[in-house]
Image (cartoon, rainbow, N blue to C red):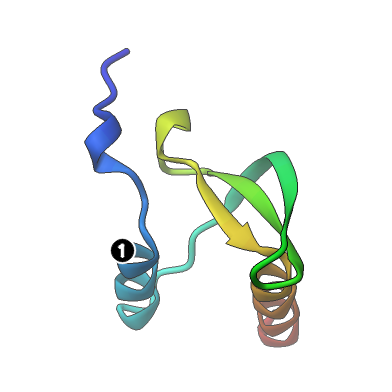
Amino acid sequence: MYAESSFEVTEENLEHLSEQGLVLKVQSIAGHKFVLDVTDYTLKALWHVFEAVEASWEPLKKLMKAIKQASEKG
């Protein structure tokens, strides 16, 4: 498998996808950590359409908000 680490999923990329109306599906959660700067947990999300090296750390509150919005649409 070829994977280029410089192709990481960034906040900017995710925002662009969101603006295009694309919804990314979380494949699994690979880790968690507490970030003192924002006093919140972040989860390492593995994305369904991306390789594992393109996982991203996402704030728990942001993911919970996205889940709520998705469930209200469905």
Q: Is residue 42 above or below residue 70?
A: above
Amino acid carrying label 1: it is: Asn
Specify the quadrant of the image occupied by residue 54: top left
Q: Position of residue 28 (x, y in %)?
A: 68, 41
Q: Position of residue 34 (x, y in %)?
A: 76, 55
Q: Position of residue 16 (x, y in %)?
A: 29, 73
Q: Is residue 47 above or below residue 2?
A: below
Left or right, residue 13 beside residue 27: left
**Extreme residue toward the top, this view:** 1
Left or right, residue 49 beside residue 67: left
Left or right, residue 6 beside residue 65: left
Residue drawn at (26%, 17%) of the image: 2
- Crowding at dot 1, Cα within 10 Å, few <14 / some 14-19 / many 20+, comes out as few
Quarter of the picture containing the N terminus is top left
Residue drawn at (37%, 74%) of the image: 15
Q: How many marks?
A: 1
Q: Position of residue 51 (x, y in %)?
A: 41, 32
* SS of the residue under disc 1: helix
Residue drawn at (33%, 44%) of the image: 8
Quarter of the picture containing the C terminus is bottom right
Q: Is residue 31 above or below residue 15?
A: above
Q: Where does label 1 land, which residue?
A: 13
Residue drawn at (74%, 45%) of the image: 32
Give the camera-side residue of 33 and 30: 33
Q: Is residue 63 above or below residue 29?
A: below
